[in-house]
Image: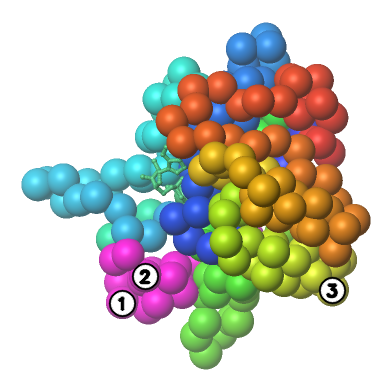
Amino acid sequence: MGKALFITGTGTDIGKTYVTGLIVKKLRDAGLRAGYYKAALSGAETLADGTLLPGDALHVAHTAGLAPEDAAVSYIYRDAVSPHLAAQIEGRPMDFDKVEQDFHTAKERMDYLTVEGSGGIICPLRWDNEEHVILDDLALRLGLSALVVADAGLGTINAAVLTAEHLKMRGIPLKGFIFNNWTGGTMQEDNVKMVEALTGAPVLARVEHGDAALPMAADALAALYD
Ligand SMILES: Nc1ncnc2c1ncn2[C@@H]1O[C@H](COP(=O)(O)OP(=O)(O)O)[C@@H](O)[C@H]1O
Ligand SMILES: [Mg+2]
């Protein structure tokens, strides 16, 4: 039975998948058995025969050199909208018993399973007459601790601190932040200082545009999983 870590972000398109690719690669390059899991992916590319491609999982598998079966996605939806809405449109709601089972299967295959969220932490996964489930509910159900990917630039103090406060309110442990699209400079250095001061959690790495390796030691990274 392996360990797991939940990668969330301050919003969609913030770089969760990109950073997750570097995380899984770093663990694998250190000789650790590392895999990827995502419960719900929406906005999938559709092939001519109707096959939906799990873009995030394919990106991480490509970056980290994973076999396709080591980058599982439970629900793949076509429309590039929140999973709850994509599921409503397709009439295919998420079954969280299946998600839990898929998660445990993935975790058993690996020593270090990186679980990518959808959108930000307030991302509705299912909203119908039977169930109301947000991503934070799922993180709690799976017993995950979170690492938050945030942009390094203007606006990140607000977005990062709100995300941290929400995680704290829900009782989801926060391991720290990774700042993405780092360019440096006075404001970005101050963003690190202010986010750390206001949340009490560390900024663990600063990823630049186009980085091919996570600028963080593999053993410190592995220690975040539980
Ligand atoms: N550090 C980076 N360097 C280069 N491209 C990046 C970087 N971070 C994100 N991107 C690109 O920005 C887009 C959105 O990032 P992605 O990781 O898919 O976001 P999310 O998973 O949070 O929705 C993708 O095209 C991704 O390749
Ligand atoms: Mg993604």
Tell me: residue 92, above or below residue 76: below
Label 3, label 2: how many angstroms apart (C-alpha)?
A: 26 Å
Which segment did they paint magenta?
A: 79-99
Residue behind mark 1: 89
Asked which colour scheme the image uses, the reply is rainbow
Label 3, label 1: how many angstroms apart (C-alpha)?
A: 31 Å
Q: Earlier in the sequence, mark 3 or mark 1?
A: 1
Residue type, numbered disc 2: Val
Q: Which mark is residue 169?
A: 3
Residue behind mark 2: 81
Q: Is mark 3 within 8 Å of ligand 1?
A: no
Viewer-nearest of discs 2 and 1: 2
Residue type, numbered disc 1: Ile
Q: Nearer the viewer, residue 182 or 68?
A: 182
Label 2 close to label 1 by CB (< 8 Å): yes
Residue 203 appears in which quarter of the rendering? Answer: top right
Viewer-nearest of discs 3 and 1: 3
Label 3 close to label 2 by CB (< 8 Å): no
115 left or right of 147 in image: left
Taking the spot 50% from the left edge, 54% from the top edge, the residue there is: 14
